[in-house]
Amino acid sequence: MNRVAKIAIAAAFSSLAFAGVSRAESLDMNTAQGIERTLRTFQGDFDIQPVYNWHNLDDEMTGPRSVIQRPQSAVYAIQASIDANKSLAHKLNNDGINIRNVVNAEQAADGSITFYVR
């Protein structure tokens, strides 16, 4: 019985360790480096949203308030990550999206990605 209890405790601690790793990754998923890493291998569902005027957040026609505006260097890095993923680039192209018009990307908790285009 003691041996079974030790194995059960070890399994519980092991599960907690893996849960901590996945949570840490989720905190990083929408940083510049995290989204670039994800886009290079992304094969899931995505959505396209237009971004209007990032600078005037009081206007009703603005981009989402929850999505940060990325610096131009980060926008180029996102576009390069999409270019590196030929399957994703092809899917976006089939949906009529020019990769050069993608100005941001955000991953949801379910793993899907929203691309923001101008």
Image: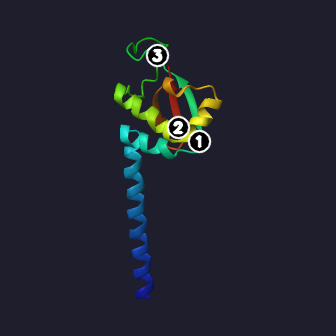
Q: Is residue 83 left or right of residue 97?
A: left
Is residue 27 depicted above or below 14 in this figure?
above
Identify the amino acid type marked 3: Thr
* Quarter of the figure with residue 103: top left
Marker disc for residue 113: 2
Q: CA distance from mark 2 to mark 1?
A: 15 Å
* Quarter of the figure with residue 30: top left
The residue that label 3 is drawn on is 62
The residue that label 1 is drawn on is 87
Disc 2 crowd rating (10 Å Cα; few below 14, some 14-19, many 20+) is: many
- Image point 62% across, 36% down: which residue? 91
Q: CA distance from mark 2 to mark 3?
A: 20 Å
Q: CA distance from mark 3 to mark 1?
A: 30 Å
Which sits earlier in the primary sequence, circle 2 or circle 3? 3
Identify the amino acid type marked 1: Ser
Disc 3 crowd rating (10 Å Cα; few below 14, some 14-19, many 20+) is: some
Give residue 85's position: percent from left, percent from top.
52, 42
Which secondary structure lies at badge 1? helix
Please indicate, yes or no, whether residue 66 appears anywhere in the rendered image: yes
